[in-house]
Amino acid sequence: MGGIASSIVIRTATPADTEALLGVEREAFGGSSEAELVVALMSSSVFIPELSMVAESEGLIVGHVLFTRAYAGGVPAALLAPLAVTPAYQRCGIGGELVCAGLGTALAGGFQLSLVLGHPEYYGRFGYEPAEPYGILPPYPVTPAEAWMVLEMDMGARERAGGTVQVADELMLPEMWRK
């Protein structure tokens, strides 16, 4: 990768990055809802500081990914939500770099699964696949069902998991599960 992507540093977010990463969330999503969700999740018991990662270019935060603790039938899972890249830096591979770095950190942290509600075409490239065929259900119905996805990081974890996923209280609202 040349150009923008080659000048990107992916790292764990620090408290000093909070305002900048919230700005990325607002800019990427065109509003404050995701930024407010990030603030709530970062204040909750499911927050794992190492799983809040930023993409930095020449001192500017241009991307952010957050994974929080969830459980699928007692199996520890890292729930990816949200992933944001400022519009000027989108379609350069930065989101993918953030996802891969976060998954590596989650695996090193003992997570056996990762879960995401997102575009199957995008997240499928990282190995995510529909979760419902494995009996791993979202807290609320999702349409299309294929948008609720799982990535197995520990062999056999999908088979050990099952039932409705337990997520942060901040995510237990039906509107959070609409794509």
Image (cartoon, rainbow, N blue to C red):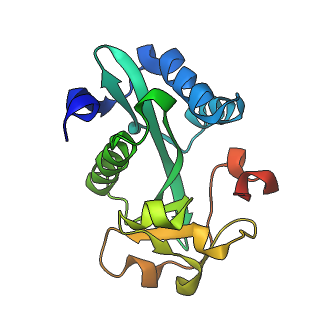
Q: Say which of 8 and 18 sits in front.
A: 8
Residue that protrudes farthest toward the right in the picture: 174
Give the residue drawn at x 62%, y 56%: 167
Q: Is residue 95 above or below residue 179?
A: above
Q: Is residue 46 left or right of residue 114?
A: right
Which quadrant of the figure contains the C terminus? bottom right
Where in the figure is residue 159, as x and y percent of width and height?
A: 44, 85
Q: Is residue 23 above or below residue 105?
A: above
The reply to whether residue 114 is in sight is no
Give the residue drawn at x 45%, y 34%: 64
Give the residue drawn at x 33%, y 44%: 93
The reply to whether residue 38 is in sight is yes
Q: Is residue 167 above or below residue 152?
A: above
Residue 60, image quadrant: top left
Where in the figure is residue 45, as x and y percent of width and height?
A: 57, 41
Residue 14, image quadrant: top left
Which quadrant of the figure contains the N terminus? top left
Where in the figure is residue 110, as x and y percent of width and height?
A: 32, 58
Q: Is residue 40 left or right of residue 19?
A: right
Where in the figure is residue 100, as x and y percent of width and height?
A: 31, 51
Q: Say which of 165 and 174 sits in front.
A: 174
Give the residue drawn at x 70%, y 44%: 170
Q: Say which of 42 and 33 sits in front.
A: 33
